[in-house]
Image: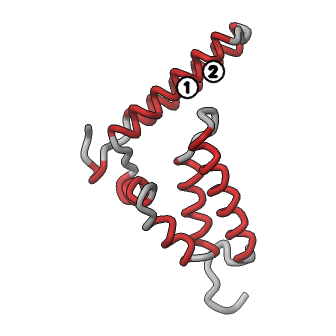
């Protein structure tokens, strides 16, 4: 193989952009639906846009609403205190809804275990600037 192609360069740019667009769309839906997370999809969108369209990645990273959180995550693996609280409250609400609709105890237990793991991960991330909160 010759040339200066980097890893992953065999994937056409259009596929990277399409994956970014799907991730971005799911992230936007997640703003409205508490069952679907927003931030992980936007992180994936930024990454895939970076592979396929640096201009789209730049627009996402400079967005006034989500750009700061994405930059904090990229630079420090950081999540702001407000976002941590919102995520934890959302997970608690989802678990409460599962209980209200009388999901089987095995499903509720599994849901509680997964959500507890997600909460632990979120709460142990540093705050913006890489500082512990």
- Closer to the camera, 128 or 33? 33
The quadrant of the image that shows the C terminus is top left
**Residue matched to label 2:** 111
Left or right of 1 in this view: 127: left
Q: Residue at x 40, y 40 (%)?
A: 83
- Closer to the camera, 1 or 20? 20
Quadrant of residue 21 in the image? bottom right
Residue 31 vertical placement versus 94 (above, below):
below
Classify mark 1: helix, strand or loop.
helix
The colour scheme used to paint the residues is secondary structure
Q: Position of residue 67 (x, y in %)?
A: 43, 60
- Furthest residue to the front? 32
Q: Position of residue 90 (x, y in %)?
A: 51, 29
Q: Residue at x 64, y 74 (%)?
A: 52
Q: Residue at x 49, y 72 (%)?
A: 58
Left or right of 126 in this view: 11: right
Residue 56 vertical placement versus 47 (above, below):
below
**Residue matched to label 1:** 115
Residue 85 vertical placement versus 132 (above, below):
above
Question: Mark 1–mark 2 contact, CB under 8 Å?
Answer: yes
Classify mark 2: helix, strand or loop.
helix
Q: Position of residue 132 (x, y in %)?
A: 26, 40
Find the distance from the CA under tag 1 to the CA under tag 2.
6 Å
The quadrant of the image that shows the N terminus is bottom right
């Amino acid at each position: 193989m010759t040339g200066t192609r980097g890893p992953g360069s065999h994937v056409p740019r259009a596929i990277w952009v399409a994956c970014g667009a799907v991730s971005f769309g799911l992230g936007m839906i997640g703003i409205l639906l508490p069952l679907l997370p927003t931030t992980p999809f936007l992180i994936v969108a930024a990454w895939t846009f970076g592979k396929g369209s640096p201009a789209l990645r730049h627009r996402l990273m400079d967005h006034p609403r989500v750009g700061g959180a994405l930059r904090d995550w990229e630079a420090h693996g950081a999540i702001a205190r407000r976002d941590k609280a919102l995520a934890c409250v959302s997970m608690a609400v989802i678990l409460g809804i599962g209980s209200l609709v009388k999901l089987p105890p095995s499903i509720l237990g599994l849901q509680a275990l997964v959500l507890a793991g997600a909460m632990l991960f979120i709460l142990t991330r540093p705050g913006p600037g890489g500082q512990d909160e």
